[in-house]
Image (cartoon, rainbow, N blue to C red):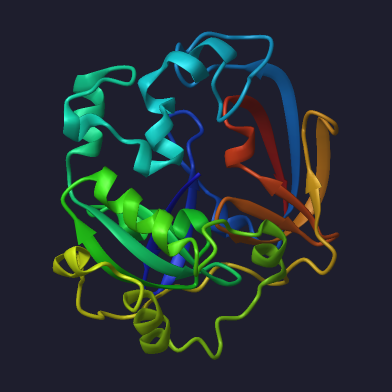
């Protein structure tokens, strides 16, 4: 599910053939999600019986360059050393470009890393309501070192339950959070520090957040009908507090039916 920000609001689109579905326009409507049972690997693009992780079959998860170690752990990047993990040319193109280390509010203030050309895409994907850039590095490895160090003082994971409950960013003092982070920078990292710009803010298309969220898995419930009450990050929130993670079902073919 792809998100963009327009006039301070998050808009969501789902690819469905040649015409993308504006999912944000479906908030308030009754949806039926039906898993057809077809699964296609993100790597080899073959139909498979089982997806292992992140939309990949078991073989591709352990061999495809897009599922390499540095994707989840930037500090494990080795392209700057000319050392191949799975495909050096692919890894150099991805890792040897500017990256940013940021703080974002996704239910709590967390630290993260993303490419400098796409921080907004990352923040929308995570469901952040506010965010600031702390530093910009020359490659992914440097950003990973910073993130690992700052994880001693900030969480690096988003608690999905807090996200879909709609925890408010009210009261976040971004000057104070930035100062707290910079206090723990090593002297050689100070050259990467960026001036405070923002915070970046966005509103999500939510009529009602979940009160007691429960995770909806199409593996366990192949067909589900409910009224969509909101979208935040990659999560569809339904009136009965069930929550569907679109990214978590990557590679699954799903039929979508809409009633007003």
Residue 150 appears in view: yes
Answer yes or no: is residue 114 visible: no
Left or right of 164, for residue 126:
left
Image quadrant in which you'd find residue 85: top left
- Residue displayed at 85% across by 31% down: 220
Q: How many marks?
A: 0
Q: Quadrant of the C terminus?
A: bottom right
Does 241 sit left or right of 117 as displayed? right
- Please state the horizontal and vertical placement of residue 116, each as a whole percent of the image: 23, 54
Q: Nearer the viewer, residue 24 or 90?
A: 90
144 or 22: nearer the eye?
Answer: 144
Image height of 144 relative to 91, above or below: below
Q: Is residue 63 above or below residue 260?
A: above
* Whole-percent x, y for residue 11 in the image: 46, 60
Which residue is painted at 42% across and 81% down in the image? 177
Which residue lies most toward the front here? 187
Instruction: Please tell me in which quadrant of the rendered image residue 208 appears.
Output: bottom right
- Residue plotted at (13% across, 67% down): 191
């Amino acid at each position: 599910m792809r998100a963009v920000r327009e006039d301070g609001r998050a808009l969501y689109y789902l690819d469905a053939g040649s015409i993308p579905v504006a999912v944000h326009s479906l908030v308030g409507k009754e949806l039926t999600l039906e898993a057809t049972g077809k699964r296609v690997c993100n790597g080899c693009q073959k139909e498979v019986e089982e997806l292992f992780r992140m939309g990949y079959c078991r073989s591709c998860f352990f061999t495809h360059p897009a599922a390499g170690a540095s994707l989840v752990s930037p500090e494990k990047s080795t392209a700057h050393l000319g050392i191949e993990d799975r495909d050096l040319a692919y890894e150099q193109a991805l890792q040897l470009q500017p990256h940013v280390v940021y703080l974002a509010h996704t239910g709590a203030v967390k630290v993260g890393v993303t490419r400098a050309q796409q921080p907004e895409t990352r923040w929308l994907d995570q469901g952040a309501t506010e965010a600031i850039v702390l530093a910009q590095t020359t490659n992914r490895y440097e950003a990973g070192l910073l993130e690992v160090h700052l994880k001693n003082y900030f969480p690096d994971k988003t608690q999905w339950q807090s996200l879909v409950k709609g925890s408010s960013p009210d009261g976040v003092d971004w000057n104070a959070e930035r100062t707290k982070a910079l206090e723990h920078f090593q002297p050689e990292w100070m050259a990467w520090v960026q001036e405070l710009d923002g915070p970046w803010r966005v509103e999500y298309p939510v009529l009602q957040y979940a009160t007691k969220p429960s995770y909806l898995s199409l593996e366990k419930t192949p067909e589900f009908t409910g009224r969509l009450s909101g979208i935040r990050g990659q999560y569809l929130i339904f009136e009965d507090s069930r929550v569907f993670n679109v990214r978590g079902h990557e590679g699954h073919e799903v039929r979508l039916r809409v009633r007003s």
